[in-house]
Amino acid sequence: MKHLLLFTLALCIVALISAAKSPYQQVLQHSRIRGRQHGPNVCAMQKIQGTNKKYFTNCKQWYHRKVCGKPTVITYECCPGYEKVPGEKGCPAALPLSNIYNTLGVVGATTTKMYSERAGLQPEIEGPGSYTMFAPSNEAWAALPNEILDALVSNVNIELLNALHYHMVNKRLTSEDLKHGMAIPSMYQDFDVHIHHYPNGIVTVNCARLVKTDQHATNGMVHVVDKVITAITNNIHQTIEIDETLDTLRTAVAAAGLTTLLEKDGHFTVFAPTNEAFEKIPPETLNRILGDPVALKDLLNYHILNSIQCSEAIMAGTPMETLQGTVLEVGCEGGEMTLNGKAIISSKDHLGTNGVIHYIDELLIPDSAKTLFELAQGSTVTTAIRLFADAGLNSYLTGSDAFTLIAPQNDAFPDASVSITPALRKVLKKHIVKGQLSSKHLYHGQQLETVDGQKLRVFVYRNALCIENACIAAHDKKGRYGSLFNVDKVLTPPVGTVMDVLKGDNRFSTLVGAIQRAGLTEMMNGAGTLTVFAPTNEAFRAMPQGELNKLMENPRQLANVLKYHIGQEILVSGGVGSHTRIQPLQGERLELSMKNYTVYVNKVPVNEADMMATNGVVHAVGSVIQPLPAKTSGDDPSVSSQHDFRQASAFRSPEVVMRNEDLFQKVVRSHSSRQLNRAK
């Protein structure tokens, strides 16, 4: 298996570093390599099952065995310009050269050959000259609507002849000569045909794919294409102007000042929303965008690519940058062209002189044109958005003032049907920050101000970016006026100092007394950045009574033990990775890890994390933390301990995994808040 993998990779490398000069030639070379086991000049083709569509294969498509999401089968055929010889392997013989008229029959474009005879074109393409003909396949002619085909063949001396002349260029052009973006005068009134050469090796003329290339003739070259192409006279803006199904788009383009853009020379792709697409948008949203030139321009630019993307050139989904600056995934599913995975394109490949238009029946609204409320729709923060609305805070989410919404994910709320209380409304208001922010510009120690004047701190860790106890869980979205930060928890803003938090929770009464005996009260109340791993009363009771009494009677030793539980920086649970270390005030480092959503410090589980204080954070632990055994190495064993206390009991309280519902209830109850209220 390993050797097979190496061999196939080698084939890809050979194809890539070959002397081919264009993507098409590279793909053709790869197909030759894949087919050479079947004889000389044999090419491997990928055929979509159930259709006649075939493609030369590149490495990516070869391994995927899919084109436009549909499975393919491998067929082996003669490479362009070669044919089989009875009794011999492969395709050893070069096709005999003849004029273009006869070559049409050889390459299977028999309908084009028949119409050439009917239109009186036969003498021209049999005689002297040097032409290139983009010959529609038999299937291409059959796919024409009956009324169009009837109109052509009923007037063979004019319409049909003109149509065939538009498929011809008055010089010999190989696939290598067909450069991306070329506009070549045709033999019909010099109207241009437009060439596009894509990175996946597909070549198109007026969005028709070249399915058989480089069929040499004595008087030129034949390329078989999969569509009958028509002359192009209008630019994109002119096409929009004359189409009644694009009335709303025409008005929007004018209001956004994009008329000049769509009139100028270029290579654009426009995904044009029809009138029906605009009508599907709620009127209040549509009127807001149409009345806002900035949002409207962003919306329209989100529908425009600065390159031509013909549907026949798509073999898989590809992200493409829009003029608005973000990307659309342009892909395909079977015969349907898709945008962002949705088959919303109702009509495709309307070519203009400066690009191509695909009609879509659904309006694409970029984030930059949305309100905060609209940004959250269909996301993972719908519960939070409902609560903001129920709390009467909708004006912050739909207005034109700049705010940043810190929105907890749905799973931060154990009960999706939770109702609004005054306490919850107060908590929710602390999730709305003044100004439109970007997480990329947040920095450690930064303070953000909420709409009610609360200060929120920013913590930057190696693996997380957190605002107080809540860490950003997904890329933020930037809307028209506001930004949306998706966070993993409900915020618990600090209320009171570390000492206030401990005093406000009966679980820490023994610890509070120990802090006072050790003379650390001032430090716990003062300014600073502390992380306190706070042993509960049960943690102290687990110690042998004699050891506990002795410890409590020695303030210096007690202070050293307590300082080993206090880090010199603020570390919330979201900042803990697999191997995180923090330096305590006394002794060597503390080692933290995260396992099954539980934080461990020196292998002691944290029972409740992230009780935020103005000068730090408190994490409840069920055991007095001991130094980890010193690591030893073969020739230099060493055991070190710089901590002035004896080994305590191995007691551990039952492991308690911090649950979101506990955190939510804690926010509502607010231990520190109760303590401060009692103190007033």
Image: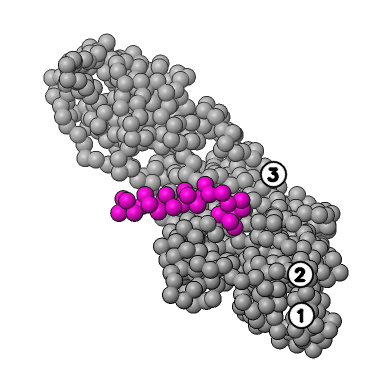
Residue bearing the label numbered 2 = 168
Residue name at image x 24 percent, y 40 percent:
655
Nearer mark to the viewer, of 1 and 3: 1
In-front residue for pair 30/392: 30
Q: Is residue 128 placed above or below 236 in the rendered structure? A: below
Secondary structure of the magenta portion, mostly? helix
> Percent position (x, y) of residue 531?
38, 26
Pick whichever of labels 1 and 3 is earlier in the sequence: 1
> Percent position (x, y) of residue 101?
71, 77
The amino acid marked with disc number 1 is Gln
Q: Is residue 325 left or right of residue 71?
A: right
Residue bearing the label numbered 1 = 122
Q: What SS does tag 1 mark?
A: helix
Pick whichever of labels 2 and 3 is earlier in the sequence: 2
The amino acid marked with disc number 3 is Asp
Nearer mark to the viewer, of 2 and 3: 2
In-front residue for pair 17/85: 85
